[in-house]
Amino acid sequence: GENVEQHPSTLSVQEGDSAVIKCTYSDSASNYFPWYKQELGKRPQLIIDIRSNVGEKKDQRIAVTLNKTAKHFSLHITETQPEDSAVYFCAGSNQGGKLIFGQGTELSVKP
Amino acid sequence: GAGVSQSPSNKVTEKGKDVELRCDPISGHTALYWYRQSLGQGLEFLIYFQGNSAPDKSGLPSDRFSAERTGGSVSTLTIQRTQQEDSAVYLCASSLDLSTLETQYFGPGTRLLVL
């Protein structure tokens, strides 16, 4: 079955710097890759997703890139702000919408 | 509109007791998913439903776990003879249908503590 690995597990950046989180997946049939942000004690919220027919997607300060050949995808946050501090999860899906999640990255943005 | 709701928000139970967790999906969403999140961990897939049918139960940790969905809407996750390792946040999500390309919206979760 699908396996998703996520790195790093923790990431600390200064406000205004960029943050990059990387994920790899094992199943070449996976075709949908969402990213969720989870603040402490809250539910996961979708921040961006990418389908396998595109290589990059951008939404304001957030972008995601997908390399199908290498089976990895990355989240890029530019001009980070303290409110970006949270745990970020990547996920992959190859069947029936079942999401397989990475282990999460705790992002801390220091003012 | 209303999002995914779950009840109870918190549940404390004694080891060996049964618990029932409820999920109300977004109206009109035919697909429903259960995940488990242990403290400081990622989300672990448990089971999903398309309508009232659960084609993939492979994620259920043991036969103490079961889930059902009736009327294509509300779902309940039942854990029998709870164990301390069952302590976690149980998250429900729903999507428009079972397509892999549909966004899953999460509920607030039920925080289960087994003493």
Image (cartoon, helix red, strand yellow):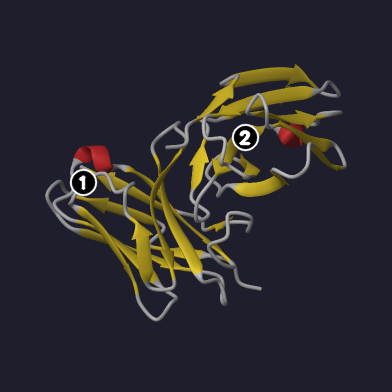
Instruction: Give the amino acid type for the residue marked by disc 1 in the picture.
Output: Ser
Closer-to-camera residue (A40/B96): B96
Closer-to-camera residue (A70/B30): A70
Q: Secondary structure at mark 2?
A: strand
Give the x, y percent position of residue B42.
47, 35
The quadrant of the picture occupied by the N terminus of chain B is bottom right
Q: Is residue A86 above or below residue A46?
A: above
Horizontal relation, residue B73 to residue A59: left or right: left
Numbered circles on residues, count: 2
Observer able to see residue B11:
yes
Reading the image, the residue beneath label 1 is B62
Picture quadrant where residue B87 is located: top left
Horizontal relation, residue B72 to residue B27: left or right: left
For mark 1, name the chain.
Answer: B
Give the x, y percent position of residue A94.
53, 46
Instruction: Give the amino acid type for the residue marked by disc 2 in the picture.
Output: Tyr
